[in-house]
Amino acid sequence: MYKDFYGLREKPFNKTPDPRFLYLSKAHEEAFARLQYVVEEKETILFTGEIGCGKTTLTRALMDSLNEQYRVILIVNPRLTATQFLRTIARRMDVKPPFNHKDDLLEAIYRKVYEDHENGITPVIIIDEAQLIPKKETFEEIRLLTNFQLDNTNLISLIFVAQPDILRRLKHKAYAPLRQRIGIFYHLPSLSEREVSEYIKHRLKVSGREIPLFTDEATDLIHRYSGGIPRLINSIATSALLDAFSKDSQLVDNTNVMDAVEELGL
């Protein structure tokens, strides 16, 4: 389809969190450095950002960067009761159920965490869409995992990935014990106008095209209507690309972008 027409090996604006397409703006680079620090120092972070800003892609890139010294436990659907959460952690750590009580589960998980520590392995728990955790009791069980420590070191790294509205919830006094365990708070902002242009060029380059495809006016409009949110940039750019292709245009211009914006209801 349009890939051959524009000299592309693959689609440049897919919405999947493929780390190959990760564009490291200054803020994304800082976020990645903080995530690495949390893993290395066995800390806890609350990593927030608006929908589609690139949080998941960054965590996938982090996972890809880790070697066998880390046991990554990724939870993508945290709508779990406290017991379901602990059972999920236990299964991902190869802890053999059944256990009848939460205390038994916690003890079994702790034994496995300590065994990992003795073998030079650090569990890294990543909870995506953490704002969807349904009840305070589940947050409390997560907090108890941060108690897994020795005199001189923590035993696990814990990464909450969430939309910003989780902050309002954690400000409630009922969540103070968990909030106090979070060592790092980082919010990922949207891309600037210049960064949107660089983002588009980067994704095109990864897809096999070195020369410009979008006019400057087109990228300015994409920034305006996407608000600098990568997922919206991808949606607008894809629709504009298809519009240009349907008109046999060699470049994507402002007219194509406005057609895409109208089509997407933006």
Image (cartoon, grey):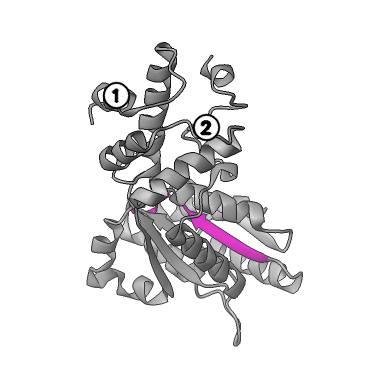
Q: Which residue is mark 2?
A: 12
- Number of labels in the image equals 2
The quadrant of the image that shows the C terminus is top left
Vertical arrangement, residue 241 with respect to residue 66, above or below: above
- Give the number of the disc on residue 119: none
- Give the number of the disc on residue 255: 1
Assess whether residue 22 is covered by the magenta stretch: no
Looking at the image, is mark 2 or mark 1 nearer the viewer? 1
Q: Which residues are magenta?
A: 122-131
Q: Residue at x 56, y 71 (%)?
A: 37
Q: CA distance from mark 2 to mark 1?
A: 20 Å
**Callout 1, which amino acid?**
Thr
> In terms of sequence position, does the residue under pointer 2 or pointer 1 come before the other?
2
The location of residue 4, given as percent across then percent down, is 59, 18
The location of residue 116, given as percent across then percent down, is 70, 67
Q: Quadrant of residue 218?
A: top left
The location of residue 40, given as percent across then percent down, is 61, 71
Q: Visible in this render: residue 164?
A: yes
Q: Secondary structure at mark 1?
A: helix
Q: Nearer the viewer, residue 30 or 68?
A: 30
The location of residue 57, given as percent across then percent down, is 50, 47
Left or right, residue 65 beside residue 256: right
Left or right, residue 146 beside residue 66: left
**Callout 2, which amino acid?**
Pro
Q: Nearer the viewer, residue 113 or 165?
A: 165
